[in-house]
Amino acid sequence: MTETIYAFSVVTLFPAMIDAFANVGIVSRAAARGIVRIETHDPRSFTANGRGQVDDAPYGGGPGMVMSVPPLRAAIKAARHGMDADALVAYLSPQGRRLDQSLVADLATRRNLILVAGRYEGIDERVIERDIDIEISLGDFVMSGGEVAAMAVIDAVVRLLPGALGSDLSADMDSFADGLLEYPQYTRPEIVDDQSVPDVLLSGNHREIERWRREQSVARTAQKRPDLLARADLSDDERDRNRKSPR
């Protein structure tokens, strides 16, 4: 059992989605080891009306409904209980900062993270102005709600916490950990149909294997995500070898 505790709290209208996610895979094992704690707060529990209404029509007209300030603000306040005073509150929004490994690494140092999952046409702007520290987006697309994005944030952060993975080296070797995509992976059997494992991986020569993996990592980044190479720490030779050819 590790003393490292990371507390996640998700403000959501669908806590069952988060609960199901928290009970499988790496996240579940990390919770069982005492590395993380995941709880949910449903804004419906903080409504003054008997119907549990958390939304209303937007001022100025327009389609859809907007999540109201009072139940959201009360749910966020409840989520803060048991957390450090400097707990970060993040709203999952397509208007937010794009989630990448750098942001994930920063979030992993926070120890206390409240994730607000919106629904409908979004949440009242006054919540964003006063209660939200950062907006986070998975990309330039729109989903029905922020729960899937919240799960993505939790999963990515948990992977970086000491003791969460079978080996802490696993996270170090993931794609984007060093600014590059991960090298190809192979496992048994050695030959499948007419496809075989590269000879270098069977050689037992760890220096050559590391060199091959580095070459593959740089090459597939150049092929699949050339935009990443500009920020990657490459030698002059690696950069010359993988310079994108003019079309």
Image: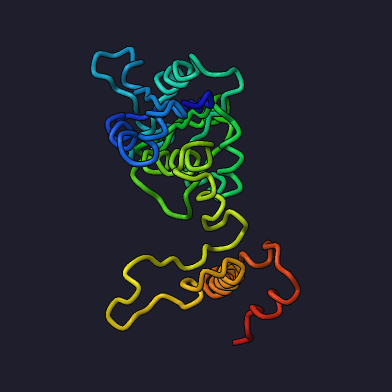
Closest to the observer, 140 or 154: 154
Colour convention: rainbow
Check the image and name the residue furthest to the bottom.
Answer: 247
Q: Is residue 90 left or right of residue 237?
A: left
The location of residue 162, given as percent across then percent down, is 53, 36
Closest to the observer, 167 or 47: 167
Closest to the observer, 200 or 245: 200
Quarter of the rendering occupied by the C terminus: bottom right
Check the image and name the residue furthest to the right.
Answer: 236
The location of residue 46, given as percent across then percent down, is 36, 15
Closest to the observer, 233 or 78: 233
Decide: is 146 above or below 203. above
Quarter-of-image position of residue 103: top right
The location of residue 185, given as percent across then percent down, is 44, 65
Residue under the point 47% across and 47% down: 94
Residue under the point 56% across and 37% down: 108
Residue 78 appears anywhere in the view: yes
The location of residue 73, given as percent across then percent down, is 46, 20
Residue under the point 45% across and 29% down: 36
Decide: is 31 above or below 216. above
Quarter-of-image position of residue 53: top left
Decide: is 31 above or below 100. above
